[in-house]
């Protein structure tokens, strides 16, 4: 454990509050976010663009720290310990970690979550939507001195579906009437719904919906939402445009099914970030992301991706113990 180092930061910069969580500090100015942490008896610091930081922070908050590692960039991020969460600086950056300059600190999840939500509500200006594609939000609004806020955008958390959208008592389907217009990129997507004829008595059990229509009306990017739950098997489709704002370090295998258009994935080693593969997925392609990698996607045109997750809570421990190979199939 590093000895605490006194640090004096201004309470506000450019109108934005400065935040402290344990030994970590977070400061934002007109263009950048600077994070500091103690190492080798000094303060180390790391700076990233404010818009990239806020897009990443939005995902981490909306997803409840997600599966495994959420790298905001090559230096800073969070690791979900399910109940607790580790914040790290440089821990999964080979050069920083080897130089002895990395730092990790573990928090109870509600404590870290509350602080992250506070940062988000203070640092997101009016007119900037960290969930939106850059072409669909006020890019300039991300920057400059603090101006208002955008609570409506940041309180739009992940849709909690119990079985399938549209079932009685479950999350709603997306329609014009509940505020979901067809996205400009999906104007050609058919909007008809399947006809469902259930045997009497099974009306609440048999269900189906047009997933392409549902996705064509997504108002956010890079935000998987559950559309079917079968025990631990979760289908989490999402629409993607520009860059996945985080670099995800899996703690389990996950499958990708490219439903439309194209995404390129950069895949690196989970621990060090060393590059491993570059993968371009076209409509219809299926890939498994191994449990020992980190990945980030790039989508030139808004596309539809199905992320298939195994939510079994035993998986991270089983991979750590080496009980399971990091890939899902042997050929
Ligand atoms: C992932 O980390 O696998 C992931 C996250 C968000 C997306 C797509 C994939 O939108
Ligand atoms: Fe992932």
Image: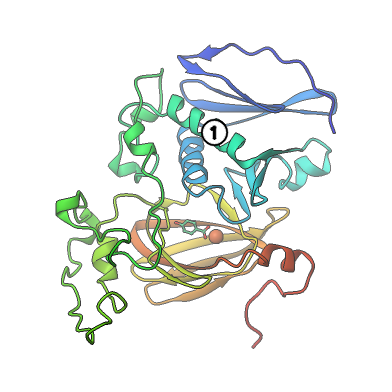
Q: Is mark 1 within 8 Å of ligand 1?
A: no
Residue reaching furthest front? 201
The spot of residue 198 in percent (x, y) is 23, 84
The residue at the point 27 percent across, 63 percent down is 214
Q: Give 161 or 297, whichever is nearer the viewer.
A: 161
Q: Residue at x 39, y 60 (%)?
A: 161
Q: Colour mode?
A: rainbow
Q: Quadrant of residue 147?
A: top left
Seen from the viewer's position, the closer of residues 145 and 203 is: 203
* Residue bearing mark 1: 114
Local secondary structure at mark 1: helix
Query: Dividing the image into 4 quarters, which one contains the C terminus?
Result: bottom right
52 or 121: which is nearer to us? 121
Residue 155 point in image, percent of width and height:
38, 39
Q: Decide: few, some or many residues near mark 1? Use Cα within 10 Å; few <14, some 14-19, many ≥20.
A: few
Q: Residue at x 74, y 44 (%)?
A: 91
In the displayed structure, does residue 81 sit left or right of residue 205?
Answer: right
Q: Position of residue 110 (x, y in %)?
A: 58, 38
* Left/right of residue 169 with respect to residue 271 in the rendered view: left
User: In the visual, does 272 lie left or right of 164?
Assistant: right
**Where's residue 66, x and y in %?**
55, 53
In the displayed structure, 159 sits above or below 48; it is below
Image quarter (top left, top right, bottom left or bottom right) of the N terminus? top right
Which image quarter: residue 261? Answer: bottom left
């Amino acid at each position: 454990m590093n000895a605490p180092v006194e640090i004096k930061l201004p309470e506000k910069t450019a109108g934005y509050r400065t935040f402290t969580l344990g030994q970590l500090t977070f400061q934002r100015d007109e263009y950048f976010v600077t994070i500091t942490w103690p190492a080798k008896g000094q303060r180390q610091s790391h700076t990233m663009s404010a818009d990239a930081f806020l897009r990443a922070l939005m995902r981490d908050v909306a997803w409840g720290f997600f599966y495994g590692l959420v790298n905001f960039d090559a230096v800073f991020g969070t690791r979900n310990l399910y109940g607790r969460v580790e914040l790290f600086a440089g821990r999964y950056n080979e050069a920083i970690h080897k130089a002895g300059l990395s730092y990790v600190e573990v928090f109870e999840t509600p404590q870290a979550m509350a602080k992250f939500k506070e940062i988000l509500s203070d640092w997101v200006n009016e007119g900037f939507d960290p969930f939106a594609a850059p072409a669909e939000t006020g890019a300039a609004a991300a920057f400059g001195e603090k101006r208002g806020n955008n609570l409506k955008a940041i309180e739009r958390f992940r849709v909690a579906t119990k079985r399938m959208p549209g079932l009685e008592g479950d999350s709603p389907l997306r329609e014009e009437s509940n505020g979901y217009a067809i996205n400009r990129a999906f104007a050609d997507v058919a909007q008809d719904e399947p006809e469902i004829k259930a045997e009497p008595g099974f009306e609440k059990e048999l269900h189906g919906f047009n997933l392409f229509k549902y996705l064509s009306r997504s108002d956010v990017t890079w935000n998987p939402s559950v559309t079917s739950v079968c025990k631990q098997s979760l289908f989490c489709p999402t629409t993607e445009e520009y860059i996945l704002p985080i670099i995800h370090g899996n703690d389990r295998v996950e499958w990708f099914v490219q439903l439309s258009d194209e995404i390129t994935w950069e895949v690196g080693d989970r621990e060090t970030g060393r590059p491993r593969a570059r993968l371009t997925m076209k409509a219809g392609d299926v890939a498994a992301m191994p449990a020992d990698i980190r990945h980030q996607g790039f989508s030139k045109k808004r596309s539809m991706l199905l992320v298939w997750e195994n939510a079994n809570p035993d998986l991270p421990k089983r991979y750590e113990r080496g009980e399971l190979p990091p890939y899902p199939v042997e050929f």
